Amino acid sequence: NKVANKEYAVELNEFGAYSIEYRATDTDGNVGTFTRSISVYDLTPPELVISDDVPKTASVGSKIKLPEATATDNVTGNVTVKIFVYSPTNVAQKYESGIKYEAKGTYVIRYFAVDAEGNISVETFKVKVS
């Protein structure tokens, strides 16, 4: 019985599924095979960049425009950013062009970016309204 010991380098440069087949042949010509499957996943969330500071305080009845944000993914490039505003009673509203603070309390602002693999980046800010 001889044991073969040979090393090979396998480069996994792309995300996806790979199969590696090991094959051995003995002196009688008998062939044995073994296949190993390897999956390479993208686990890196997008990089979320907010262009300016979100105000920490506001007055009831005031209307503000939130800073813009961009997100870049290591695989797909640009990713859409969505912004949600949560009222003091925890009612969520998708941010479109401005917020009117209609009640006293703490509002939560969340910026979200999700890439094609489902990796998520979230930035959360609180605004105290009085």
Image: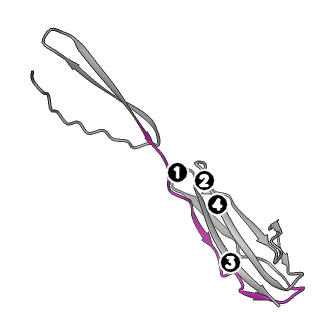
Callout 1 crowding tier (Cα within 10 Å): few <14, some 14–19, many ≥20: some
Residue ranking furthest to the top: 28
Q: Going 48% across and 46% down the picture, which residue do you hit?
A: 41
Q: Going 14% across and 28% down the picture, which residue do you hit?
A: 4
* Marks 1 and 3 in Cβ contact (< 8 Å): no
Read off the residue under disc 4. 113
x, y percent for residue 101 = 86, 81
SS at mark 3? Answer: strand
Read off the residue under disc 2. 115
Q: Distance between the residues labelled 2 and 3?
A: 22 Å
Callout 4 crowding tier (Cα within 10 Å): few <14, some 14–19, many ≥20: many
Observer-side mark, 3 or 4, equals 3
Callout 2 crowding tier (Cα within 10 Å): few <14, some 14–19, many ≥20: many
x, y percent for residue 65 = 79, 77
User: In which quadrant of the rendered image does the N terminus lie?
Assistant: top left
Membership of 47 in magenta stretch: yes
Q: Which amino acid type corresponds to the residue marked 4 in the rendered image?
A: Ala
* Marks 2 and 1 in Cβ contact (< 8 Å): yes
Q: Which amino acid type corresponds to the residue marked 1 in the rendered image?
A: Val
Observer-side mark, 2 or 1, equals 2
Among the 4 quarters of the image, the one containing residue 87: bottom right
Task: Tell me which secondary structure the magenta stretch mostly adopts.
Answer: loop
Q: Distance between the residues labelled 2 and 1?
A: 9 Å
Q: Going 74% across and 76% down the picture, which residue do you hit?
A: 108
Q: Earlier in the sequence, mark 3 or mark 4?
A: 4
